[in-house]
Image (cartoon, rainbow, N blue to C red):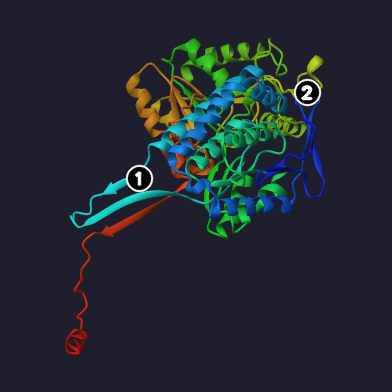
Amino acid sequence: MTDPATLYVDGQWLPAESGETREIRCPADGSHVTTVSEAGRGDVEKAITAARRAFDSGTWPRTVARDRARVLRAVADGLRERKEEFARAESFDTGKRLVESRIDMDDIAACFEYFGTTAAHDAGRLVDADDPNVLSRIQYEPVGVCGLISPWNYPLLQAAWKVAPCLAAGNTFVLKPSELTPSTAILLMDLLTECGVPAGAANLVLGAGAVAGAPLSEHPDVDMVSFTGGLVTGRTIAASAAATVKKVALELGGKNANVVFADALFDAAVDNALNAAFVHSGQVCSAGARLIVEESIHDEFVDALVARARDIRLGGPFDDDAETGPLISAAHRDKVTEYVRKGVEEGATLRCGGEWAGGELEQGFYYLPTVLDDVRQGMSVVVDEGFGPVVTVETFTDEDDAVRIANDTRYGLAGAVWTQDAGKAQRVANRMRAGTVWINDFHPYLPQAEWGGFGESGFGRELGPTGLDEYREAKHVYQNIDPGVSGWFTDRTASTRDGEN
């Protein structure tokens, strides 16, 4: 893509009013990917106006659920047909391996399929009013105009988690993806239009959050804002949205505990601890960045983990031998570097990694898989989200100790417990304060199961029935089919009326 007219507003591709553009470069090697428009506030307000008009007087909110579902399922089919095109665009923007991007595309198609199916079969519910002369029902209506702000680590997946239920519920939207990874959002707008989403219902603005994203949380014509990203930005969005009392959904990351008991299947637990921490170089909100191991197996387990972490092959998206890729930018690599440096300064033992990859990878933003042992509660690397290929190791003595350590975080997005004792697994999972808990696994999710966090991981849910409800308002309609005089107040005008008659 080389055409800078990449803002999609009211069914038209437009350049930014200012003419400003941004170059997108692949983090694997710095190569030029595309040049896109850089929206200003005026561009965003134009998109909001289009979405508002499309909601208030357009066809999409008044399209029956069955037909909206048909469009969403067509989008799913289109994603499957164009899987390679979308996957390659995602890999160029993010630097992630092509095989990972292909998996993402399958998951995205499944998301549109799920919400298409769900929307077609949810007609509200009847309420028993305990009165034969009353019909009482709950009906669901779209929230209105939605501002959707998605991150760079899973650009189209996270956008789809918002766009699919938003459209399924009958809303209109303005999507603002990360300024670093816009390519698949551009492709998605074309696909939505081809599948029947009308002009104005789906709008796209590109640019930095402070300029292109801020109006979505501030503007009075936006009824809801959904944001996935960092805690600091999430707080700002929540505060801005409060001024107009918008509906808000926030997914703000995590500091996720991966608890391994001594009776866990050793090889499986080690292997999945690697997956938990180092998939996509740790740039995953639910990454198992806190490894909490029973004291009796600490040495053996961490030795095995370190040996395998040292062997992880780094490389670009189209390197068939690569097992994970680069960080998203030089600035983010610097942030991870400082994060590890501070942890070592506070007393953590650096077992492997802790530096940039060199050699043939030095043109990209690669950071070696890193294990920090002997950490203590309260250290910055235990408390703060690093969002890189870094795992810390803590130990526990018994079940209560494991739960206490796992829950010692202000976040609460995800966690895992590894043990062959089914009772212990369920007890620990029940006590962990996290929105998702895996038992003897790490990372899988299902479109039909809610995703979201406790505490400072945010509020609201994506996916599942609750994910659809985030984009709907519940209305109670109470109908008296045999209306009459209530008799609550005495009618003192009745005799007068009788006399007049």
Query: Looking at the image, which is closer to me, 184 or 390?
Result: 184
The residue that disc 1 covers is: 124
Which x, y percent locates residue 136?
Answer: 28, 53
Q: Could you tell me which secondary element the residue under label 2 belongs to?
A: loop
Crowding around mark 2 (Cα neighbors within 10 Å: few <14, some 14 to 19, many 20+) is: many
Q: CA distance from mark 2 to mark 1?
A: 51 Å
Going from the N terminus, do you reach mark 2 or mark 1 first? 1
Q: Residue at x 69, y 43 (%)?
A: 12
Vertical order, 307 against 214 (above or below):
above
Does residue 290 appear in this view? Answer: no
Give the quarter of the figure containing the C terminus.
bottom left
- How crowded pointer 1 is (Cα within 10 Å; few <14, some 14-19, many 20+) is rated as some
- For disc 2, the marked residue is 364
To which quarter of the image does residue 371 belong? top right
In the depicted view, which residue is nearer to us: 22 or 368? 22
Q: Position of residue 480 (x, y in %)?
A: 25, 60
